[in-house]
Image: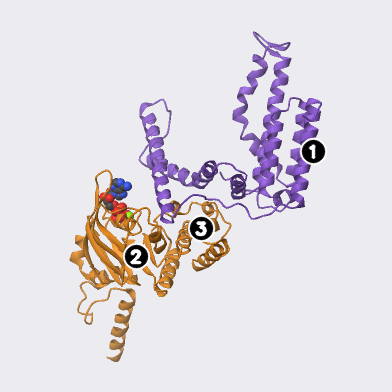
Amino acid sequence: MQFLDLHTGRDTPVHRLDPRFKLVTMLAFLVVVVNLRQPGALALATAVICLVLFTARIPVRYVLARLLMALPFTGILFLIPFTTPGHAALKFGPASVSYEGLSLALVLVMRLGAALLVTTALTSTTPLTDLLRAMASVGVPTVFVQLVHFTVRYFSVLSEEIATMRRAQRSRGYEPGSVLRPDHLRAMAQLIGMAFIRAMERGERVYRAMRARNYREGLFRPPSRRAGAGEYAWTALTGLVICLLLLVDRGSPL
Amino acid sequence: MMAIEVKGVSYAYPDGTPALREVSLSIPAGSRTAILGPNGAGKSTLLLHLNGLLAPQRGQVFVAGRPVLGDEDTWVRETVGMVFQDPDDQVFSATVAEDVAFGPQNMGLSPEEVVRRVKASLARVGLRGYEERPPHRLSYGERKRVAIAGVLAMGPDILVLDEPMAYLDPEGRLRLRAILDELSAESKTLLVATHDVDFAVEWSDHVVILRGGRVFRSGGPEVLRDAELLREASLTMPTVARVFAGFEGLCRDRCPLTVGEARELLASIQTELEVE
Ligand SMILES: Nc1ncnc2c1ncn2[C@@H]1O[C@H](COP(=O)(O)OP(=O)(O)OP(=O)(O)O)[C@@H](O)[C@H]1O
Ligand SMILES: [Mg+2]
């Protein structure tokens, strides 16, 4: 989670926007983007987000790294051209690639890319704390907000615990090897089991410490910032871009 | 006036481990008490009883003369502040300011008062300017101080700390000592659970030794002179006492326990030598 909050400290017009407005507009934009059907509309959407990322002065390398993180999940997309029925474009022995499959795969890849860019734009210009508060104040259930918050807060604590346990295993001569060997499989299972137990015990201790400070409901205060002209202009602009995208994509704004 | 009175408290954990057996003790208001004992002696378990996080199965706990009933008692949490051993258990919020504000907010204070308390407590632990920092990016010692600030912000008269010196580097320990001394000067009642006999002799005016869930011995820090007693309680002798063990001839009426006493003794021996 080292990449979190890496570039959120900059001072650009995008960074300065009220997180609540940024959250809602970007989510709306995201919903539209993943429903676009024409590559042209998707290209336009991508260009718009790139403009936002550029305005926010987010380094290209960082953006590319975030995109690469999603690469393992795209594998399935490469099957689509082979499995979608339609007019054959290429033949590899018994397998054939269809035009319909190719364009479907293209649209899906573009949607994924654009969606990732939107979330990158949101999370790299808004500190996580502000984002969580914004989520709470626009009505995301508290339980969910707290879930995200505790995951981020305790990710490093738990991964440090797991690293310590692995070191302890190795210092007693265990070399992690094939999971196919029964003794290695057992060591691995023990590690995972212990990690779970420790996480649960940690949870209990955290809850106890919260009770010690008279915990009741309501963890997050709404942000004190007030929306100004910038926020309204941004919202209007987003609305305009969304209409334009739908116009290009569907031939009508709705 | 007794800040805390524990009367015949017994407690066994749900798995049957008896952790406290008939523990009775009195902590005078404004005192600095060290609760000593080997691992598993029941120190942490005892502390959890002092602000109602655990309810005694037998016996009763009184804070400022009022009986502690258990989980529903909110007043006791405002009177007795608990600093847990691991700051990661305690400091859970996304920013330092939010974490310190947690207690005061739960007390239902006004936003202005919450902000005032957050600023004041962060200043007291030397963390001014850390308000917006995320705790998971702070050092261990800094997180520990955030935990203390979060408790101080509730304005407790009694402060209970479990192993506060553990894992702190020497500078962190000095800093914590300074914070404790300042709180003591404000006549807060302080209780510290520790294995550290040296810390206990230097800092406390009252010592409780637990062993196997029972109060083994209590009294002033001079009980820590007794080598036999310490061995039975699986505790080490204070370093200064170890140095002077076997040199009783050099000591005046009694051998020194703290570094300060030792230096005084050495200084007086030196002057005597110079006179000769
Ligand atoms: N959650 C628990 N469930 C069951 N038994 C427990 C639990 N916590 C502590 N115990 C047991 O209760 C006894 C007292 O434990 P406690 O943590 O109070 O000791 P301690 O003096 O704080 O020790 P340490 O110096 O190691 O912190 C020990 O025997 C311990 O094994
Ligand atoms: Mg303990």
Q: How far apart are labels 2 and 1 at the CA level? A: 63 Å
Give the Cα separation between the discs numbered 1 and 3.
42 Å
Which of discs 1 and 3 lies nearer the camera? The answer is 3
**Host chain of mark 1:** A
Foreground residue among A4 and A146: A146
Between A75 and B162, the residue placed more toward the observer is B162
N-terminal label among 2 and 3: 3
CB within 8 Å, label 2 to label 1: no
- Same chain for mark 2 and mark 3? The answer is yes
The residue at which mark 3 appears reads as: B105
Residue B267 % position (x, y): 32, 83
**What is the chain letter for disc 2?**
B
When asked about the image quadrant of residue A196, the answer is: top left
Q: Chain of mark 3?
A: B
* Res A167 visible: no
Residue that lies at the very extreme toward the top in this rendered image:
A94
Q: Which residue is mark 1?
A: A240
Visual hue assigned to chain B: orange
Task: Residue B191: give its label.
Answer: 2
The local crowd at label 2, few if under 14, some if 14 to 19, many if 20 or more residues have their Cα within 10 Å, is many
Q: For numbered disc 3, what is the local secondary structure?
A: helix
Amino acid type at image mark 2: Leu
The local secondary structure at tag 2 comes to strand
Colour that chain A carries in the picture: purple
